Image (cartoon, rainbow, N blue to C red):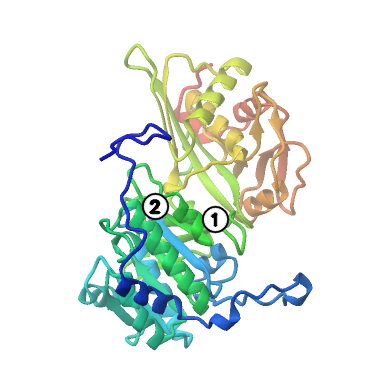
């Protein structure tokens, strides 16, 4: 018994595992690994002899999923799909299985958490899932060898990797050793057979994928499905993708018939926006190749206690603190001893600095009780000296804002104005606040007070 690791001095981090395995386990493991043709492996090829189209993609039929994957699922690849409980991981995986089956490919859906009857009930709510999708309830890795050989599937979905176990390791399902060994065995089998493999994974309370870190290194694609239960929106992001970009994002809405892709997320996020409301500003952000318009809301109120409170949802607390300091130092907006609440609508999380200018304007708008014009948007990075800096792909952001009816876009110098719109070039955050004072919505001027 050794409770403490001699290397990192951590307690309870050592896991016992049987590295030898039994004879029966060895035979079944070899049978599982023999799903592919051994003659096609172990051959080195020069780069010029490898065709460029040697990795064809299987289009899933789910446009938003294909966008994030880079065009579809690559045969022989391993995709890890994670997310909070109830966010829709199993629903999305079952929709993927149904679309691939509709395209003529054989599909094997392995469930370790639910019974086949429960999967059947979920499939009954999804109109695109055909009735001939093969479903297997199994948690033992070695028991998948025979069905895998018989079906020769184009796609295998495993829900979830934490419930599976292999006879090679004598630890409980979900342990570090079991997850690592099970994922490695399944990945080798999928690559040998040329089968696309989708693993559904759990997340911890910190929001990271449960299991060893080597699990994310082992797979080819890591997808994360994000969303709040109180919102119908779901965002699909790729944190790792060996076959495409990790900057793309897929937008879904949770409906009665499953997850539906959103072709124009900007209109969806702005559909419930209130007109002439102080503390609101629109910012065009870019996720991969897709521009989206998001609303940032701010509320500045007198502090009821000795220490002012700062609360931010959907945006980094550090960016909010930085904008408050810049406004207080470089403008006449008084934010001392004020409670500040910032929210990004729709459950979206903004991580890029292009939202700095919109955040600063939302804070100033709430404090001055002056609403931005209905047709105004803003984007730009704000430095510590109060200057507004350029951001990437600003022309794409401006065009998207103009397409949705925003005729005045506050942006740093260098942005080109599209037809029918005006780019208000601001050099500093003080210039932006002055522009707000001059062009505030008439409704806000009549109904609210304008503190200095």
Tell me the mark number nearer the camera, choosing from 2 and 1.
Answer: 1
Quadrant hosting residue 253? bottom left
Q: Which residue is mark 1?
A: 240
Q: Secondary structure at mark 2?
A: loop
Apparent side of residue 160 relative to residue 396 in the rendered image (left or right): left
Assign a secondary structure to mark 1: strand
Disc sitting over residue 227 in the figure: 2
Residue nearer the viewer, 294 or 77: 77
Residue lying at 37% horizontally and 14% vertically, measured from the top left: 307
Q: Is residue 312 visible?
A: yes
Name the residue located 41 percent from the left edge and 47 percent from the top edge: 208
User: How packed is label 1: few (under 14 Cα within 10 Å), some, or many (20 or more)?
Assistant: many
Q: Is residue 447 above or below residue 404?
A: above
Query: Horizontal and vertical percent for residue 67?
Result: 56, 65
Quarter of the image containing the N terminus?
top left
Q: CA distance from mark 2 to mark 1?
A: 19 Å
Seen from the viewer's position, the closer of residues 60 and 211 is 211
Q: Position of residue 266 (x, y in %)?
A: 53, 55
Give the image location of residue 8, x and y in percent: 42, 34
Residue 403, placed above or below residue 185: above
- Earlier-in-chain disc, 2 versus 1: 2
- Please give left or right for residue 365 compared with residue 159 in the image: right
Which residue is nearer to you in this view: 287 or 151?
Answer: 151
Q: Compared to 442, does 182 lie above or below?
A: below
* Quadrant for the C terminus in the image: top right
Looking at this rendering, what residue extends furthest in the top direction? 306
* Observer able to see residue 129: no
């Amino acid at each position: 018994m050794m409770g403490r690791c001699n290397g990192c001095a951590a307690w309870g981090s050592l896991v016992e595992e049987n590295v030898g395995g039994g004879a029966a386990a060895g035979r079944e493991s070899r049978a599982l690994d023999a799903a592919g043709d051994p003659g096609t492996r172990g051959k080195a090829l020069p780069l010029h002899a490898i065709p460029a189209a040697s990795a064809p993609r299987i289009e899933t039929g789910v446009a938003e999923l294909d966008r994030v994957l880079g065009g579809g699922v690559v045969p022989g690849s391993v995709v890890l799909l994670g997310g909070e409980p109830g966010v829709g991981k199993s629903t999305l995986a079952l929709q993927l299985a149904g679309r691939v089956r509709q395209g003529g490919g054989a599909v094997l859906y392995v469930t370790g958490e639910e019974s086949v009857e429960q999967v059947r009930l979920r499939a009954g709510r999804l109109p695109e899932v055909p009735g001939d999708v093969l479903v297997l309830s199994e948690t033992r890795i070695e028991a998948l060898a025979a069905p895998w050989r018989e079906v020769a599937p184009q796609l295998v979905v495993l829900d979830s990797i934490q419930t599976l176990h292999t006879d090679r390791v004598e630890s409980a399902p979900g342990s570090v050793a079991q997850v690592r060994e099970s994922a490695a065995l399944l990945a080798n089998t999928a690559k040998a057979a040329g089968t696309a493999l989708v693993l559904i994974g759990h997340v911890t309370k910190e929001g990271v994928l449960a299991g060893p870190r080597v699990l994310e290194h082992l797979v080819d694609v890591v997808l994360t499905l994000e969303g709040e239960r109180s919102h119908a929106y779901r965002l699909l992001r790729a944190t790792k993708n060996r076959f495409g970009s990790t900057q793309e994002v897929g937008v879904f809405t949770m409906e009665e018939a499953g997850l539906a892709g959103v072709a124009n997320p900007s209109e969806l996020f702005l559909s419930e926006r209130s007109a002439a409301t102080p503390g609101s500003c629109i910012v065009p952000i870019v996720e991969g190749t897709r521009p989206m318009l998001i609303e940032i809301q701010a509320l500045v109120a007198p502090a009821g206690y000795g220490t002012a409170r700062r609360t931010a949802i959907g945006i980094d607390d550090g960016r909010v603190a930085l904008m408050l300091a810049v406004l207080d130092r470089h403008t006449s907006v008084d934010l001392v001893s004020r409670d500040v609440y910032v929210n990004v609508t729709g459950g979206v999380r903004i991580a890029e600095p292009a939202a700095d200018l919109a955040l600063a304007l939302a804070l100033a708008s709430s404090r001055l009780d002056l609403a931005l014009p209905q047709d105004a948007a803003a984007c730009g990075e704000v430095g510590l000296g109060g200057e507004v800096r350029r951001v990437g792909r600003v022309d794409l952001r401006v065009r998207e804002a103009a397409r949705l009816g925003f005729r005045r876009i506050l942006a740093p110098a260098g942005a080109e104005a599209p037809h029918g719109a005006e780019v208000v070039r601001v050099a500093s955050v003080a210039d932006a606040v002055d522009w707000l004072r001059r062009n505030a919505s008439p409704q806000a001027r009549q109904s609210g007070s304008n503190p200095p």
